[in-house]
C-alpha cells in the first residue's frame, strides 16, 4: 500500500501512522452540547467507497488527509490538513 | 531415460557436477536442474505421494511441479518440499526423497494405497466421529503424525536472507517472447524497466520450442534481446525471480533465489524478498500445460509434453520410447518437431477424429489412454481406439490436455477471470489489477507471433500512459499457427484418474464431493483438499472444476474458479522475515552515557527502544536491591547522577508558541516567565491523561517541553496534529530535539557542590528556574527541577559532549560520597514522592483520578477539556491515586495485586482497586505502593487486603497520602 504525502510524494505505507477518519478535523466549539462531542469523539460511519482519513507521515511530520476507496483500495489524494478542512 | 550425447542448450558440458540422491552418487552438468539431472541419470522414481504413498516421478519442468518435492541438504540440515524442477544443480548437492520410509522404492506407508477404497474424500470426517473421547487422545495425534508433507528442520536457521525495494516505470513479469518484446520496446523508449523471470535463463518457451523468429532459432533471438537489454542502463534484469503477489498501489512481491544454486554460499543471501513498485505492469507469465485425467495417470514416466520437450531441448534428456496423448494442435505439432529432432515417438493419441496423419509416427485419432502399467515407473500404456483396447510399450507418456494461461497475479485483487471456449481455459479480463495488462500466452494468445505482437502493443500502451514515445522498430516474424483444442477433462475407465497429484485427489473424489453436497467449487476444494498442496493446484484446479461441473451438470464458466491468492510460489518465512529478526526487529537507541554505564557493570533494561542502566553494582552487593538502596540513599543524603536524556524534548518557537501551549496543556503556560519552568499535564481529546512533563520558557517566544520516555513519539504526533489541524495559521513551529541534547539529573543535598566544580561560579537559580550556561566553550542549559524530591538540577549539553560530562559528573558525585544511580533507584525516589509515570497514567486515568484537578484550568479551551467534564470522569465512583503502606512495613507487596476489604473474598465484584507501582524505601524502611482505589482520597487510614493471587501474596495495607516523603516539598524547594 502506498500513500501520498503532500510534502514528500508517494511513500510506502510503513512510513505512516494511522489515526482515524477525518471527522477528527471537525472539532466542536468548546461549549457545544455533549451530544456534539460524543459524535465527534466516538461515532464514525463505515463507508463502502470514498473515505477520508488521517495519516501521520513520520519522517517529515506532516499530517495528511488521504482520500481513498474502501472497495477498490485506490488512493486518490493526500492533502495537508489546512487544505482538507 | 538417459542423457543424449549432444545438445542441451542450458548445459555447460565442460563442467561436470557430482551429486547425491537418496545416497546414490550421480553426475550432472552445470546448468542442470536437480530434476533434469535425475532424469538424465535414469532416476524416474523421486518420491511418494502425500496420501496413498504412490510412487511418483517428475511431471513438469517448472515451478508448478506437484510430484518432485524432495528434501535438500542446505546449511547442514535437510529442508523439505524443495521442487526438483526449479532447484539448480550444484557440486556436492545432497537430496533425498520425502514422504517415504525406509525408501522411495520400499515405502511402508504404501499400505495406504491398498486401503484407498476406504480413504476417499471426507474419510476422516466420517470415520473418526466416535467414540467422541477418542478424538483428542487417539485419533488426532495419529492423524497428525501421518499428515503433513515433509518435516521442517527443528533447529534455528540463521542462513542470511535479504530484503530489497525497487521502483520502475514498467515491470515485465516473464521473459518469454511476449515479455521480451514488451521489455525491449519499453527499454528502447527510455522507460525504467524491470524484467523478472523465474528461470535462470530468459527466453521462456523459446528455449524449448522449435519455432523460429526472424529466421533464427527462438533461443538465439531471445539471447540477442537479452544482450541488448543487459546493455541498457535503464533496464534491470532479474532472473531467478518469481513475482508472487500483486498488492495495492502497484506493489508486487517477488522472491529472488540468491545462493540456492551455490555449492558454498557462505554469507551470500539464500533468497531476497523484493517489493517492487511499478507504475505499469505487463503480465507475460505464459501458460501452464494441463495433464489429462486418465486412469493410472500418476506413474513415474507420465509427464507433461511441454516438459518432455523442455528436458530434451534444454537438458538433452532422452525420454526413451515416448507415447504422446494430446487433445490439441499444439501437442501434435510439438510431437512432430520432437520426432524430427530424433526423439523416439512411438504414437500420438488424440480423442479428436479426422486428424491428418502425415507424421513419422502412428497417429491414433479418436483414441484415448485408458491405463498404464509399471510398478516404479511406466512400462506400457493401454489405449482404446475404434472400440479396440491394446497395449504399447513406453518409457514416457507425454500428456497435453491444453494450456491454462498463468493468470494468477491478475486475479490477486479478487478479480474473476472469464471462460474462453476457443481455448477451453480461463483468461484474465482487462483491469482486474489496475495498471496491469496480461499479454501473450498469459492472455490466451498462444502463437509466437501473437505473443510478440501483444508484447509490443502492451509496451506502447504503457509508454503512452507514462508520457513516453514508443520507438519505431522492425517487428520480428514468427509462426502464427492456429490453436484448436477439444476439451478432454477425464477419460472414463477402470482405475483411479488423478487430478491433484500432490494431494492425491482423483476424479472420483470430486464426484463424491458433488454427490455429498459439496457442489460449490470452494466447498469441493476444502472437502477433497484439491489444490491445497504446495503446488496450489497450478496444473490441476482447472481439471477438477471441469469434473465438478460435469458431476453437477453445470458449465465450467458457471462453476467458476476458486480464489487466487498470493503467493504464486511458496515463499519461505525466512525470506519474508528478512531484516526483521534479532536486533533488526527492534533497533537499539543508546544514550551518550551508555558505554560508561556498561563499563561500570550496569545491567541495561529496555525502555521502548532505549537502553537504560538498571543499577550500578558493587563487589559486596548481595543482590540488585543492595545497589538500589545505596543509590537511593546517595541521592537522599549526598548526591546522585542519572542520565535522563531519553525523555522526549520538543522545542517550540514563534509568537504564538505560548498560546499554542495553553491549548495543549490543561494548565496555563502563557503566564510563565522566561527563565522559569512549570509542570504540565496534557489530556487526550477524550478527557483522559495523555502525558505529563515540564515546560521551560527559554525566551519570550521560545519554549522547551519534555515528555515521558514512553510517550515521546505519541506526544510529538499529537502536537503536530493539533497544530496542523486546528492552528495552522498560528505562528508557531515545533520540532523534536530529543537526540540533540544529553541531559543529566544531579540530585541531592550536595548537588550544588558538584555543579560548583563544573561551573566555578554556579548561577543562582530558584526552584523551577532555568538558564543558559557555559561549560567552557560549550553552551548548555541548566534546569532546577527534581524528579527525586531532593534539591536538584538537570544539566543539558549538545549530545556530542554527553559522554564526557557524564563521566565528570559521576566522578564528582563519587568524590562527595554519592555516585551514579539507575532506573531502580530513580523509581524508588519518585514513588517515595508520589510522582506518577506511565505505570499510573495507564490511558484510563483522568486528572481528577491523579488528584491533579487543580491543574485543569476552568478559564480556557484546551484539548480534552470538554470530555474531561463528562459525567463519570470525576467523583466518588472513580479509582483515585493513593499511597499504600503494608501494616507490617517489611511485608513484601507487589505491583498488579488487587485490593479488597479485609473481610471480603478476592472476587472481581468486591474489587476496591489495584496496585500500580511498588518499591522498598530504604529511607522510610518500608515497602510502599502507589495504587488506584475507588474513592481512595476519602478513605485514608482505611485498611485493605492486598491480594496477589498469581504469586500467593496476601498483605494487610493501609491507605495513605501518595506523597510518602517530605510531603510539603521543602527539600527540593529550599
Image: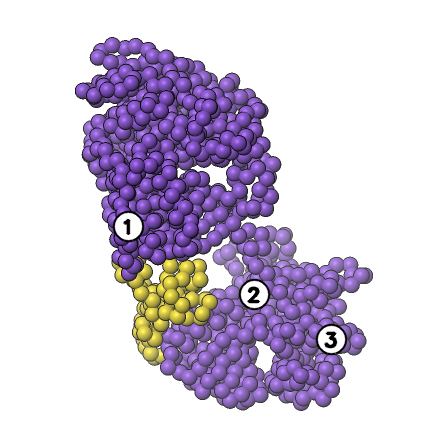
Chain colours: A yellow, B purple
User: Who is closer to the viewer here, B58 or B193?
Assistant: B193
Which residue, given by chain and number where applicable, does mark 1 sit on? B473
Residue B709 sits above or below residue B86 on the image:
below
User: Who is closer to the viewer here, B178 or B211?
Assistant: B211
Comes first in the chain, label 3 or label 1? 1
Is label 2 in a helix, a strand or a loop? Answer: loop
User: Is label 3 or label 2 in front?
Assistant: 3
Q: Position of residue B225 (x, y in %)?
A: 37, 45
Chain designation of label 3: B
Which residue, given by chain and number where applicable, does mark 3 sit on? B808
Residues behind callouts 3 and 1 on a single chain: yes
Chain designation of label 2: B
Which residue, given by chain and number where applicable, does mark 2 sit on? B839
Chain designation of label 1: B
**Residue sticking out furthest to the left:** B354
Tell me the residue at 52%/69% (across/down). Answer: B712
Q: Position of residue B399 (x, y in %)?
A: 33, 24
Separation of residues labelled 3 and 2 (CA atoms): 32 Å
Is label 1 in a helix, a strand or a loop? Answer: loop
Is label 3 in a helix, a strand or a loop? Answer: helix
Q: Position of residue B632 (x, y in %)?
A: 71, 70
User: Is label 3 or label 1 in front?
Assistant: 1
Amino acid at each position: 500500500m502506498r500513500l501520498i504525502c503532500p510534502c514528500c510524494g508517494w511513500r510506502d505505507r510503513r512510513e505512516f501512522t494511522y489515526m482515524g477518519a477525518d471527522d477528527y478535523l471537525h472539532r466542536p466549539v468548546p461549549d457545544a452540547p455533549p451530544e456534539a462531542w460524543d459524535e465527534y469523539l466516538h461515532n464514525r460511519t463505515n463507508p463502502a467507497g470514498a473515505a477520508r482519513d488521517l495519516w501521520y507521515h513520520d519522517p517529515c511530520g506532516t499530517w495528511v488527509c488521504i482520500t481513498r476507496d474502501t472497495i477498490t483500495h485506490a488512493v486518490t489524494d493526500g492533502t495537508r490538513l489546512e487544505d482538507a478542512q | 531415460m538417459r542423457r543424449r550425447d549432444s545438445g542441451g542448450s542450458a548445459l555447460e558440458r565442460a563442467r561436470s557436477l557430482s551429486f547425491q540422491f537418496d545416497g546414490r552418487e550421480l553426475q550432472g552438468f552445470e546448468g542442470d536442474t536437480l530434476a533434469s539431472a535425475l532424469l538424465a541419470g535414469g532416476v524416474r522414481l523421486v518420491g511418494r505421494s502425500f496420501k496413498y504413498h504412490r510412487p511418483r516421478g517428475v511431471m513438469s519442468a517448472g515451478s508448478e511441479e506437484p510430484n518432485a518435492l524432495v528434501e535438500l541438504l542446505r546449511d547442514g540440515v535437510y529442508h523439505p518440499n524443495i521442487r526438483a524442477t526449479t532447484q539448480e544443480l550444484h557440486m556436492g548437492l545432497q537430496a533425498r526423497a520425502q514422504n517415504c520410509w525406509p525408501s522411495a522404492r520400499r515405502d511402508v506407508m504404501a499400505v495406504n494405497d491398498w486401503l484407498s477404497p476406504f480413504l476417499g474424500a471426507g474419510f476422516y470426517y466420517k470415520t473418526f466421529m466416535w467414540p467422541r473421547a477418542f478424538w483428542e487422545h487417539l485419533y488426532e495425534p495419529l492423524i497428525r503424525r501421518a499428515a503433513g508433507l515433509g518435516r521442517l528442520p527443528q533447529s534455528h536457521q540463521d542462513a542470511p536472507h535479504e530484503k530489497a525495494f525497487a521502483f520502475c516505470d514498467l515491470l515485465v513479469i516473464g521473459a518469454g517472447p511476449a515479455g521480451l518484446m514488451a521489455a525491449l520496446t519499453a527499454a528502447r523508449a527510455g522507460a525504467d524497466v524491470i524484467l523478472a523471470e523465474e528461470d535462470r535463463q530468459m527466453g521462456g518457451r523459446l528455449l524449448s520450442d522449435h519455432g523460429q523468429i526472424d529466421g533464427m532459432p527462438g533461443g538465439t533471438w531471445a539471447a540477442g534481446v537479452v544482450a541488448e537489454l543487459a546493455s541498457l542502463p535503464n533496464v534491470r534484469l532479474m532472473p531467478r525471480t518469481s513475482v508472487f503477489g500483486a498488492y495495492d498501489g502497484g506493489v508486487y512481491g517477488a522472491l529472488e533465489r540468491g545462493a540456492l544454486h551455490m555449492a558454498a554460499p557462505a554469507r551470500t543471501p539464500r533468497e531476497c524478498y523484493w517489493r517492487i513498485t511499478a507504475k505499469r505492469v505487463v503480465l507475460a507469465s505464459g501458460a501452464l500445460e494441463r495433464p489429462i485425467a486418465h486412469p493410472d495417470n500418476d506413474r513415474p514416466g507420465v509427464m507433461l509434453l511441454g516438459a518432455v520437450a523442455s528436458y530434451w531441448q534444454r537438458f538433452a534428456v532422452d525420454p526413451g520410447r515416448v507415447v504422446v496423448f494430446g487433445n490439441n494442435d499444439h501437442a501434435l505439432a510439438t510431437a512432430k518437431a520432437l520426432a524430427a529432432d530424433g526423439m523416439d515417438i512411438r504414437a500420438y493419441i488424440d480423442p479428436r477424429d479426422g486428424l491428418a496423419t502425415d507424421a513419422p509416427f502412428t497417429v491414433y485419432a479418436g483414441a484415448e489412454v485408458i491405463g498404464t502399467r509399471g510398478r516404479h515407473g511406466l512400462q506400457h500404456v493401454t489405449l482404446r481406439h475404434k472400440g479396440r483396447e491394446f497395449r504399447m510399450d513406453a518409457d514416457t507418456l507425454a500428456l497435453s490436455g491444453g494450456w491454462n494461461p498463468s493468470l494468477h497475479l491478475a486475479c490477486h485483487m479478487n478479480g474473476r477471470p472469464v471462460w474462453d471456449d476457443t481455448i477451453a481455459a480461463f483468461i484474465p479480463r482487462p483491469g482486474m489489477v489496475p495498471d496491469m495488462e496480461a499479454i501473450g500466452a498469459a492472455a490466451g494468445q498462444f502463437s509466437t507471433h501473437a505473443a510478440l505482437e501483444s508484447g509490443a502493443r502492451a509496451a506502447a500502451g504503457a509508454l503512452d500512459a507514462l508520457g513516453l514515445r514508443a520507438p519505431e522498430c522492425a517487428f520480428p516474424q514468427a509462426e502464427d499457427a492456429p490453436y484448436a483444442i477439444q476439451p478432454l477433462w477425464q477419460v472414463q475407465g477402470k482405475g483411479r484418474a488423478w487430478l491433484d497429484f500432490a494431494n492425491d485427489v482423483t476424479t472420483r473424489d470430486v464426484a463424491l464431493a458433488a454427490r455429498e453436497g459439496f457442489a460449490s467449487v470452494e466447498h469441493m476444494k476444502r472437502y477433497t483438499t484439491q489444490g491445497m498442496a504446495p503446488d496450489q493446484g497450478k496444473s490441476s484446479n482447472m481439471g477438477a472444476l471441469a469434473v465438478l461441473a460435469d458431476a453437477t451438470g453445470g458449465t465450467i464458466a458457471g462453476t467458476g474458479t476458486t480464489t487466487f491468492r498470493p503467493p504464486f510460489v511458496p515463499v519461505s518465512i525466512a525470506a519474508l522475515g528478512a531484516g526483521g529478526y534479532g536486533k533488526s526487529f527492534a533497533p537499539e537507541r543508546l544514550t551518550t552515557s551508555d558505554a560508561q554505564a556498561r563499563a561500570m557493570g550496569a545491567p541495561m533494561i529496555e525502555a521502548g527502544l532505549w537502553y537504560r542502566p538498571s543499577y550500578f553494582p558493587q563487589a559486596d552487593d548481595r543482590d540488585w536491591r543492595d545497589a538500589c538502596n545505596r543509590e537511593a540513599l546517595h541521592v537522599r543524603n549526598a548526591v546522585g547522577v542519572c542520565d535522563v536524556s531519553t525523555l522526549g524534548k520538543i522545542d517550540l518557537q514563534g509568537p504564538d508558541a505560548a498560546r499554542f501551549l495553553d491549548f495543549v496543556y490543561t494548565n496555563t503556560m502563557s503566564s510563565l516567565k522566561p527563565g522559569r519552568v512549570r509542570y504540565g499535564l496534557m489530556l487526550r481529546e477524550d478527557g483522559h491523561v495523555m502525558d505529563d512533563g515540564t515546560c521551560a520558557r527559554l525566551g519570550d517566544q521560545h519554549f522547551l517541553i519534555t515528555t515521558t520516555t514512553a510517550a515521546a513519539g505519541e506526544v510529538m504526533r499529537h502536537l503536530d496534529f493539533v497544530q496542523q489541524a486546528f492552528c495552522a495559521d498560528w505562528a508557531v513551529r515545533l520540532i523534536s530535539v530529543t537526540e540533540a541534547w544529553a541531559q543529566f539529573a544531579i540530585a541531592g543535598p550536595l548537588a550544588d557542590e558538584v555543579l560548583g566544580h563544573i561551573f566555578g561560579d554556579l548561577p543562582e537559580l530558584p526552584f523551577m528556574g532555568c538558564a543558559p550556561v557555559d561549560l567552557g566553550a560549550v553552551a548548555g542549559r541548566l534546569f532546577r527541577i527534581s524528579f527525586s524530591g531532593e534539591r536538584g538540577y538537570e544539566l543539558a549539553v549538545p549530545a556530542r559532549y554527553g559522554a564526557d560530562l557524564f563521566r565528570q559528573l559521576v566522578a564528582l558525585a563519587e568524590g562527595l560520597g554519592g555516585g551514579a544511580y539507575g532506573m531502580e533507584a530513580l523509581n524508588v525516589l519518585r514513588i517515595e514522592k508520589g510522582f506518577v509515570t506511565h505505570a499510573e497514567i495507564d490511558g484510563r486515568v483522568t486528572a481528577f483520578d491523579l488528584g491533579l484537578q487543580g491543574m485543569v484550568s476552568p478559564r480556557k479551551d484546551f484539548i480534552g477539556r470538554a470530555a474531561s467534564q463528562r459525567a463519570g470522569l470525576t467523583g466518588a465512583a472513580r479509582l483515585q491515586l493513593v499511597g499504600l503502606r503494608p501494616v507490617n512495613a517489611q511485608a513484601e507487596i507487589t505491583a498488579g495485586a488487587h485490593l479488597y476489604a479485609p473481610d471480603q473474598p478476592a472476587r472481581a465484584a468486591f474489587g476496591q482497586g489495584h496496585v500500580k507501582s511498588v518499591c522498598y524505601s530504604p529511607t522510610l524502611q518500608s515497602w510502599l505502593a502507589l495504587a488506584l482505589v475507588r474513592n481512595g482520597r476519602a478513605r485514608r487510614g482505611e485498611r485493605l487486603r492486598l491480594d496477589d493471587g498469581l504469586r500467593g501474596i496476601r498483605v494487610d495495607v493501609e491507605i495513605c497520602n501518595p506523597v510518602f516523603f517530605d510531603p510539603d516539598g521543602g527539600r527540593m524547594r529550599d
